[in-house]
Amino acid sequence: MSTPSVSSLGIRDFTAEQLIRIARLFASDDSHAGQVDLTVTERQRISLDSNAHLEVWLMVWPVGSTTGWHDHGQAAGAYVVVTGELIEESRRGGSVGDLLLEKGDERAFGAGHIHNMTNVGDTPALTVHAYSPGLTEMTPYELVDGRLVPVNP
C-alpha cells in the first residue's frame, strides 16, 4: 500500500481528530516495518511527510528506550501505536498519569502537552506521529522536587 502525501491538502490548521486520522492513515501502511532497522539501540524518527503546517513521523522504539520529559512547543500532535507496548506519563498539576499503549491505540494532545514515553515491551515498538504546525521546538524537562522544570538549552 502506498501512503498518499499530505503536502497538498491545502489545510493549515488541523484539529485533534484530523491529526488522529492522518496518523491512522500512515499507520495503516504495512510497509513501515520493512523501512526501518529494528535492531537499532537508540530511538529513531523517520520523516514520512512534512510541510510548514504538518509533519508525519515514523518512530522506532528499541526495548527500554524513552523520550525523557518534553513538550512539542506550539505543535499539537497525535500518534498511533503500530507495534509494541509503550507507557506515556503525563503530569497535570501535581499528579502523574500513566497510560499503557498497545498496537492500535491512539492519542491526541494539544500544544504545550508535557509527557514522557517509554517502550516497556519485550520487542521494539513502532509509532506514527502527526504534528501541526510542524515541529520547530521541543523543550526538555527534568523532575525537580516533584515539579517539571525546563532544562536550559
Image (cartoon, rainbow, N blue to C red):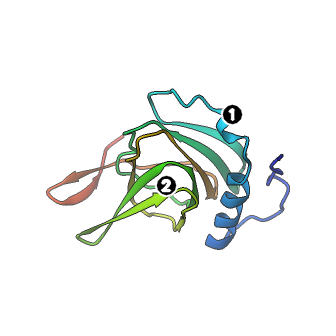
Q: Residue at x 85, y 55 (%)?
A: 8
**Residue of label 1:** 34
Measured in 3D between alpha carbons, the distance from the residue under mark 1 to the one under mark 2, in whole angstroms, is: 28 Å
Q: Secondary structure at mark 1?
A: helix
Q: Quadrant of the C terminus?
A: top left
Q: Secondary structure at mark 2?
A: loop
Determine crowd level at label 2: few under 14, some 14-19, many 20+ residues with C-alpha closer than 10 A.
many
Q: Residue 66: x and y, percent?
A: 38, 43
Q: How many marks?
A: 2
Look at label 2 and name its amino acid.
Answer: His
**Residue of label 2:** 72
Q: Nearer the viewer, residue 47 or 25?
A: 25
Q: Nearer the viewer, residue 74 or 58?
A: 58
- What is the quadrant of residue 11 in the picture? bottom right
Which circle's residue, 1 or 2, is located before the other in the chain?
Answer: 1
Q: Residue at x 48, y 36 (%)?
A: 43
Q: Nearer the viewer, residue 17 or 7?
A: 17
Look at label 1 and name its amino acid.
Answer: Gly
Q: Are marks 1 and 2 in contact (CB under 8 Å)?
A: no
